[in-house]
Image: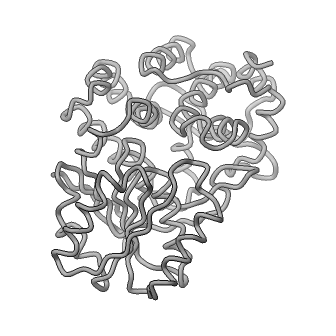
């Protein structure tokens, strides 16, 4: 097991990465104010890992409540959130109850938002079971639900007490989910670490084959990059926006197609292609580097385009981006692989050129 620490002062917390961690209550017990937890998971993950986590905690004297949700991005809404509150209230859960998010990004985001708002805030711990959740959504304290007009539009910054990433869960991950998670791994190399991007080019087949050593390195390096950025900009006032590379386009695709039509990582991959093209059009990124990005994403089996959305519809949806200020979209551009920046002065012609492939 390897452990990182997200350095946020009083809100600092560990990220544990290793094998057979779900059955280790010692990673969770130090973070419980009382020996009572509510495990929030979904109907896909529950048959695989819920009993193991539940019994490990009960064996340590912890009272456990199970909350099993339907699966899918389309479930990340007010109705599902309210069902979590219903279960907590029915079980008389108080502020000493800790929520455990056992699942992927949807479960983690929704559970985190429930923890941030139930009785004005209760502790929660992330136990991510997908590659995307382990490298991205479980780290950093962004919690949210979706709105029909925009993804993750309703939420809060609320840090977990700990993140427990059991690498063994990736062995049961469907291929499509694995590929989607690789999009966020690739993003970390693009915005911060050219050598890591080089490593990904050289080791992609090992990752697709679920080689444990390669996956462990990808998760560790991604968490190192993200935790370092979050520690310096917890509430996304500046540098943390770099983590949204490709997301302005990607979130528009997810919203426009309907939540769940594309996986989040698939939409981010397509969004990164648009963002790379935008960087070329804006004159910041050499075309040869954009071609390398496109080649790696294609080798990873990730989609391009916008699923049939028109250029006008994409622009309409992108105008809702959370990074926008005074109705100006702030884009994340690349200067080169491994170096990104935020720009609020991208010419409309450059945006149009990046979307030129759309009708």
Residue drawn at 37 percent across, 75 percent down: 65
Q: Is residue 140 left or right of 277 when viewed as pictured?
A: left
State whether residue 306 is above or below residue 132. Answer: above
To which quarter of the image does residue 201 belong?
A: top left
What's the coloring here? Answer: one colour
State whether residue 75 is above or below residue 251. Answer: below
Residue drawn at 82 percent across, 39 percent down: 316
Residue drawn at 42 percent across, 60 percent down: 41
Residue drawn at 74 percent across, 37 percent down: 345
Image spot of residue 198 (x, y percent): 34, 22
Q: Is residue 243 left or right of 27 when viewed as pictured?
A: right
In this view, the residue in front, 332 or 2, is 2
Image spot of residue 161 (x, y percent): 35, 70
Image spot of residue 250 (x, y percent): 62, 36
Q: Is residue 311 left or right of 57 when viewed as pictured?
A: right
Image spot of residue 337 (x, y percent): 46, 25
Image quadrant in which the C terminus is located: top right
């Amino acid at each position: 097991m390897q452990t990182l620490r997200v350095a946020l002062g009083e809100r600092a917390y560990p990220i544990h990465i290793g094998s057979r961690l779900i059955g280790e209550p010692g990673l969770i017990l130090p973070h419980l104010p009382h020996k009572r937890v509510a495990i929030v998971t979904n109907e896909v993950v529950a048959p695989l890992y819920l009993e193991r986590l539940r019994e490990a905690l009960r064996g340590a004297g912890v009272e456990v409540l199970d909350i099993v949700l339907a699966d899918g991005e389309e479930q990340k809404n007010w109705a599902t959130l309210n069902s979590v509150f219903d279960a907590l209230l029915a079980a008389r859960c108080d502020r000493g109850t800790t929520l455990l998010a056992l699942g992927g990004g949807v479960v983690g985001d929704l559970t985190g938002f429930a923890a941030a708002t139930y009785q004005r805030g209760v502790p929660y711990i992330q136990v991510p079971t997908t590659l995307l959740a382990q490298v991205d959504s479980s780290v950093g304290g962004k919690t949210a639900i979706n709105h029909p007009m925009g993804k993750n539009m309703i939420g809060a910054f609320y840090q977990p007490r700990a993140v427990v990433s059991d690498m063994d869960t990736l062995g049961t991950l469907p291929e499509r989910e694995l590929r989607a998670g690789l999009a966020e791994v690739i993003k970390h190399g693009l915005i911060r670490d050219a050598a890591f991007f080089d490593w990904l080019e050289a080791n992609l087949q090992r990752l697709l084959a679920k080689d444990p050593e390669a996956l462990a390195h990808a998760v560790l390096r991604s968490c190192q990059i993200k935790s370092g950025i979050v520690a310096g900009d917890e509430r996304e006032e500046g540098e943390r926006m770099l983590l949204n590379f490709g997301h302005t386009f990607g979130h528009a695709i997810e919203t426009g197609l309907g939540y769940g039509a594309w996986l989040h990582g698939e939409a981010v991959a397509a969004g990164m292609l648009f963002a790379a093209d935008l960087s070329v059009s804006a004159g910041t990124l050499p075309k040869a580097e954009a071609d390398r990005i496109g080649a790696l994403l294609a080798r990873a089996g990730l989609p391009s385009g916008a699923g049939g959305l028109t250029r006008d519809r994409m622009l309409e949806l992108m105008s809702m981006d959370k990074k926008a200020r005074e109705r100006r979209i702030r884009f994340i551009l690349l200067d080169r692989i491994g170096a990104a920046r935020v720009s609020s002065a991208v010419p409309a012609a450059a945006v149009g050129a990046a979307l030129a492939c759309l009708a």
